[in-house]
Image: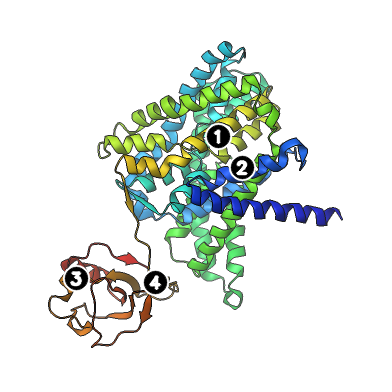
C-alpha cells in the first residue's frame, strides 16, 4: 500500500507541476518558479512530509548533471566561439567578484538585523549564490522563442553553464574552513581551483571524444533506443570519474556535452529529444523536492525575511551589475545596453539551493539559516528577474522575434544533403512566377511548398506567390545561401 501511495503522490505532483508550467507560459512567469511553488504548497504544514537534505542534494546532483549535459549538447560551438572569452571571464572572475561584494555586504548588514555572522560564514553565504543558474537560464531563454542581438544568448548560456564549478569550489573551500576551524588560505584555494578546473576541462573533453567514438563504433542499430541509455551512462561516467580524479564534475559534464553535441553521432535528433524530455522531468522533480524540503515558517521569520530581501535586492541592483561591469570591461564589442542586459539576467535558481544543502549535509554551524536565506533570495531572483527577461530585452531594443519553422522536418544524420526553408519575395518573381523561372544552383530541389495553411509538392510549371514557404534540399548549401541572398532573402531557416 505504501508503494501505491508513493506513486499516487508522485503522479499528482508531476501532473500539477505540468499544469503550473503551462500556466507560467501564459502568464510570462518562469515555469521553474511555479514548480518550486507547487512543492512548497504540498509541503506546507507537512501535507507531504519530506526532510531529507541528503536525498534532496542527491536529486539535485543528478538533475544538474543532465541539465548541463543537455545544455552542452544543444549549444553550437560556432555560436559560442565569438563570446568564449567574455563568457569564461564572467564564469570565473564574475563569480568571485559577486561572492566578495555580497559577502562584504552581508557581513556589515547582519549586525543591523540583530544577526551575528563571522566573515567566513558571510562569504560562504554569498558563495552559494554567486553563480547564475543554468536550469533557469536555459529553460527561460529557450522557451521564450526570442532572439537576442550581440550574441547575448550564447554568452548567457555559456556563462550559466560553466560558472557552477567556480562557485562550487568557493563553497567547498569555505565549508572546509568553517567545519575544520581553519583559516582562509588564498594559496590553497587558488591551487584547488586550478587543479579542479584543469582536470575537469581535460577529462570533460577526453570523455566527450570517447563517448563520440563509442556511439559511432558500437552497433546497436537493431534497437536504436539503447543509444539513449548508452549516452546517459557515458554522461554519468564523465561526472563520477572526473570527481574521483579530484576534477570538477560539473565543468567536465558540460564540456563533454558540448563535444558530443558538435560532432557527428548516430541518431542525434532522437538523443536530443530524449535528453530534452529527461531534462524537463528532472527539473520538475528537482524543484518539487526543493520546495518540499523548505519550512515556510522558518522562511518567513524576521531575521531570514529581512536578510533575504536585503541580499536579493542588493545582488540584483548592485553586486551583479558591478561584477558584470568589471568582468566585461576589456571587451569593447558589447554596447552599454548589452552590458545592462547581461547584468540583469543573473538568475538564481536550483544551484544556489543545492549548494546551500551541501553546507547542511556537511555540518556547517548555522547552515539551516543559510539555506533559508538562499532559498528566499532565489525566489526573489526568479520573481523579479525571471519574469522580466523578455521585457527587459524589449525595453533595451536588444530582442527580435525568432522565425519559427513552417516545415517540422527531422533529417536523419546519415543524409549529407541539407534542408532549408526560404520565403518567396518579389525579387524572386521578377523573371517569372513559375518554379522553373527561379534560377537555383545545381543539385538543388524545391521539394514542398506551404501556402495558406496547405502543403503540396510542386512541379516546374507551378506558379509561385509572394509569401510562399519553400522547402529546399541542396548538396551545396553555401552556394544556395549565396544565390538566395542575391535575390534579397536574408533569413534562411536551416532544418
- Which residue in the protein does label 4 denote? 407
Residue in the image at 37% along x and 62% along y: 404
Where is residue 377 shown, x and y percent of the image?
55, 30
- Front residue of this view, candidates 136 and 199: 136
User: In terms of secondary structure, where does tag 1 sit?
Assistant: helix
Mark yes or no: residue 477 visible. yes
User: In terms of secondary structure, where does tag 3 sit?
Assistant: helix
Identity of the residue furthest to the left in this view = 431
Q: Residues within 10 Å of mark 4 (few under 14, many from 20)?
A: some
- Which residue in the protein does label 2 denote? 36
Q: CA distance from mark 2 to mark 1?
A: 10 Å
User: In terms of secondary structure, where does tag 4 sit?
Assistant: loop
Nearest to N terminus: mark 3 or mark 4: 4
Nearest to N terminus: mark 2 or mark 1: 2
Nearest to N terminus: mark 2 or mark 4: 2
Q: Residues within 10 Å of mark 1 (few under 14, many from 20)?
A: many
- Which residue in the protein does label 1 denote? 378
Q: Are marks 1 and 3 in contact (CB under 8 Å)?
A: no
Q: CA distance from mark 1 to mark 3?
A: 50 Å
Residue in the image at 65% along x and 30% along y: 359
Relative to 421, say whether 309 is above or below: above
- Which residue in the protein does label 3 denote? 483
Amino acid at each position: 500500500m505504501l508503494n501505491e501511495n508513493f506513486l499516487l503522490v508522485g503522479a499528482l505532483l508531476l501532473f500539477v507541476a505540468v499544469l503550473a508550467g503551462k500556466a507560467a507560459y501564459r502568464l510570462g512567469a518562469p515555469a521553474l518558479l511555479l514548480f518550486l511553488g507547487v512543492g512548497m504548497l504540498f509541503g506546507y504544514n507537512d501535507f507531504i512530509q519530506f526532510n531529507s537534505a541528503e536525498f534532496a542534494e542527491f536529486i539535485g546532483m543528478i538533475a544538474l548533471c543532465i541539465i548541463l549535459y543537455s545544455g552542452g549538447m544543444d549549444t553550437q560551438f560556432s555560436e559560442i566561439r565569438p563570446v568564449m572569452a567574455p563568457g569564461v571571464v564572467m564564469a570565473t572572475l564574475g563569480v568571485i567578484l559577486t561572492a566578495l561584494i555580497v559577502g562584504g555586504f552581508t557581513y556589515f548588514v547582519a549586525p543591523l538585523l540583530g544577526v551575528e555572522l563571522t566573515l567566513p560564514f558571510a562569504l560562504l553565504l554569498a558563495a552559494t549564490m554567486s553563480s547564475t543558474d543554468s536550469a533557469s537560464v536555459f529553460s527561460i531563454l529557450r522557451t521564450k522563442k526570442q532572439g537576442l542581438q550581440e550574441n547575448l544568448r550564447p554568452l548567457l548560456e555559456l556563462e550559466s553553464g560553466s560558472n557552477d564549478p567556480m562557485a562550487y569550489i568557493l563553497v567547498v573551500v569555505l565549508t572546509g574552513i568553517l567545519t575544520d576551524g581553519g583559516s582562509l588560505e588564498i594559496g590553497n584555494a587558488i591551487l584547488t581551483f586550478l587543479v579542479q578546473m584543469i582536470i575537469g576541462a581535460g577529462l570533460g573533453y577526453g570523455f566527450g571524444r570517447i563517448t563520440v567514438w563509442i556511439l559511432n563504433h558500437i552497433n546497436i542499430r537493431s534497437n536504436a533506443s539503447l543509444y539513449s541509455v548508452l549516452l546517459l551512462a557515458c554522461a554519468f561516467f564523465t561526472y563520477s570519474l572526473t570527481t574521483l580524479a579530484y576534477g570538477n564534475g560539473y565543468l567536465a559534464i558540460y564540456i563533454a556535452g558540448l563535444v558530443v553535441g558538435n560532432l557527428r553521432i548516430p541518431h542525434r535528433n532522437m538523443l536530443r529529444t530524449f535528453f530534452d524530455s529527461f531534462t524537463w522531468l528532472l527539473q520538475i522533480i528537482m524543484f518539487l523536492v526543493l520546495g518540499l524540503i523548505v519550512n515556510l515558517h522558518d522562511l518567513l521569520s524576521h531575521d531570514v525575511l529581512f536578510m533575504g530581501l536585503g541580499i536579493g535586492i542588493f545582488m540584483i541592483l548592485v553586486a551583479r551589475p558591478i561584477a558584470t561591469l568589471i568582468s566585461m570591461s576589456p571587451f569593447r564589442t558589447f554596447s552599454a545596453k548589452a552590458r545592462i542586459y547581461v547584468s540583469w539576467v543573473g538568475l538564481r535558481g536550483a544551484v544556489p539551493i543545492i549548494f546551500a544543502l551541501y553546507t547542511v549535509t556537511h555540518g556547517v554551524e548555522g547552515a539551516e539559516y543559510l539555506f533559508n536565506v538562499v532559498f528566499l533570495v532565489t525566489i526573489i531572483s526568479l520573481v523579479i528577474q525571471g519574469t522580466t527577461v523578455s521585457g527587459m530585452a524589449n525595453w533595451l531594443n536588444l530582442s527580435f522575434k525568432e522565425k519559427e519553422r513552417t516545415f517540422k522536418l527531422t533529417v536523419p544524420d546519415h543524409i549529407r544533403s541539407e534542408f532549408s526553408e526560404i520565403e518567396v519575395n518579389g525579387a524572386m518573381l521578377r523573371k517569372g512566377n513559375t518554379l522553373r523561372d527561379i534560377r537555383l544552383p545545381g543539385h538543388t530541389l524545391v521539394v514542398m511548398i506551404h501556402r495558406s495553411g496547405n502543403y503540396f509538392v510542386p512541379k516546374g510549371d507551378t506558379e509561385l506567390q509572394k509569401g510562399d514557404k519553400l522547402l529546399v534540399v541542396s548538396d551545396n548549401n553555401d552556394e544556395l545561401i549565396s544565390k538566395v541572398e542575391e535575390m534579397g532573402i536574408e533569413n534562411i531557416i536551416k532544418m
